[in-house]
Amino acid sequence: MAFLDHLNRLYRFFGQSVFWVLFGLIGVVVGFLILPIVNLFIRDRKTREVTARNVISVCFRLFVQVACWMRLISCQVTGMEHYDRSGNQLILANHPTLIDVVILISLFPQVDCVIKEAVTRNPAMRMLVGSANYISNREAADLLESCTSRLRSGAALLLFPEGTRTVPGRPLQFKPGAAEVALQARAKILPVVVDCRPQFLAKHEPWYYIPPRAPHFDIRVLAPVDPVDMIPVCAGKRNARRALNAALQELFLAELA
Amino acid sequence: MNNDDLYARIKSILVDQFEVEESAVSLDANLYEELEIDSIDAVDLLVQLKELTGKKIAPEIFKDVRTIRDVLHALNAL
């Protein structure tokens, strides 16, 4: 059996390498060719945004399907009925791996998300991110403002309250930013639990590390929660943020236990 | 504005807006651990300091700030 396990691991190493090359190539083709051509025919910014997000989401859905088909990962999604397609939801997810965002965007095509500024400097990514009008996190003060104003204008916004990937071996820790956005925008929260076992493409883990078994993603979309129900009545601004942050963190910790 | 005035203003921001106990505030009190300022408060504080002094502390520099003394140093260095 050990021999077959080794063979499977070797297969996944090559499979994954091919997959990354494919991912990069398609990124370049979409960023430098498809979107510029599409944008030639679309003048309206909003239509461009919707189109670019659809293109990205379709590509990501394809990536996930190919990765599952190649048995590099397996993936199960439950609770999608809780997702409100009309927007106006703050989608909060934990962030155990580099690729959970690929799965999430494949599930929520029109979602707004925050992109690391360093990523937006990459030329292929700049085209993608620019057309899709995702939020770049240049400055903390602006970031809060853009997040709340997009939510208020009826968008669905995806945030990882951890602010970065989960540090392996440590319980997840939420930063208060996501709670603050929820409170300021008075948005309903859609908690999405990403349970990936065994650990895969985690923080500080090199991309070429291949886990002993193919990682299984169990994505659980929970029932939406109203922030107001999670905080004590009459709490001040700071206490409300703290209470909501703690309650959300508790919710995810319980789900992942 | 000299350091004493600045300190008094920062103290009053902390007490009035961030609900920090006045007795807990000192030059060397740790903003995050002792005064329980979180990252959102820190952003708020930066904005207010800019309004107060007209100087803008870069977020990279503010990352290393731990105490009110550090805040004064950072402002003076600008």
Image: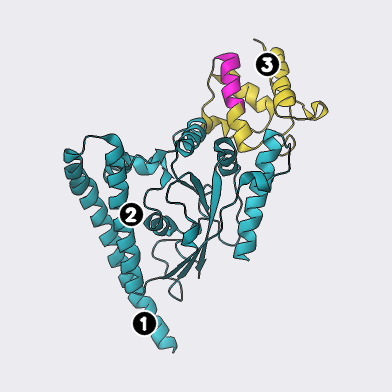
Chain colours: A cyan, B yellow
Q: Which residue is most to the right?
A: B23
Type of amino acid under label 2: Ser
Q: Which residue is most to the top?
A: B1
**Quarter of the image that includes the C terminus of chain A:** bottom right
Q: Is residue A98 left or right of residue B67?
A: left
Q: Which stretch is magenta?
A: B45-54
* Residue at the image point whose x is 62% and y is 45% from the top: A227
Query: Which residue carries the number 2 mark?
Result: A57
Residue A137 occupies quadrant: top left
Query: Which residue carries the number 1 mark?
Result: A7
Task: Give SS at disc 1.
Answer: helix
Residue A25 vs residue A49, the one in the foreground: A49
Q: Is residue A88 left or right of residue A11?
A: right
Type of amino acid under label 3: Leu
Q: Nearer the viewer, mark 3 or mark 2?
A: 2
Mark 1 closeness class: few <14, some 14–19, many ≥20 residues within 10 Å: few
* Residue at the image point whose x is 51% and y is 70% from the top: A197
Q: Nearer the viewer, mark 2 or mark 1?
A: 2
Q: Is residue A104 left or right of residue B55?
A: left
Type of amino acid under label 1: Leu
Q: Is residue A141 left or right of residue B65?
A: left
Residue A171 seen: no
Would you say the magenta stretch is mainly helix, strand or loop? helix
- Tell me, yes or no, whether the two marked residues, 2 and 1, touch with CB atoms within 8 Å: no
Residue A198 x %, y %: 50, 70
Query: Which residue carries the number 3 mark?
Result: B6
Chain of the residue that carries numbered disc 2 in the rendered image? A
Residue A103 x %, y %: 40, 59
* Residue at the image point whose x is 37% and y is 80% from the top: A8
A187 up-or-down from A223: above or below: above
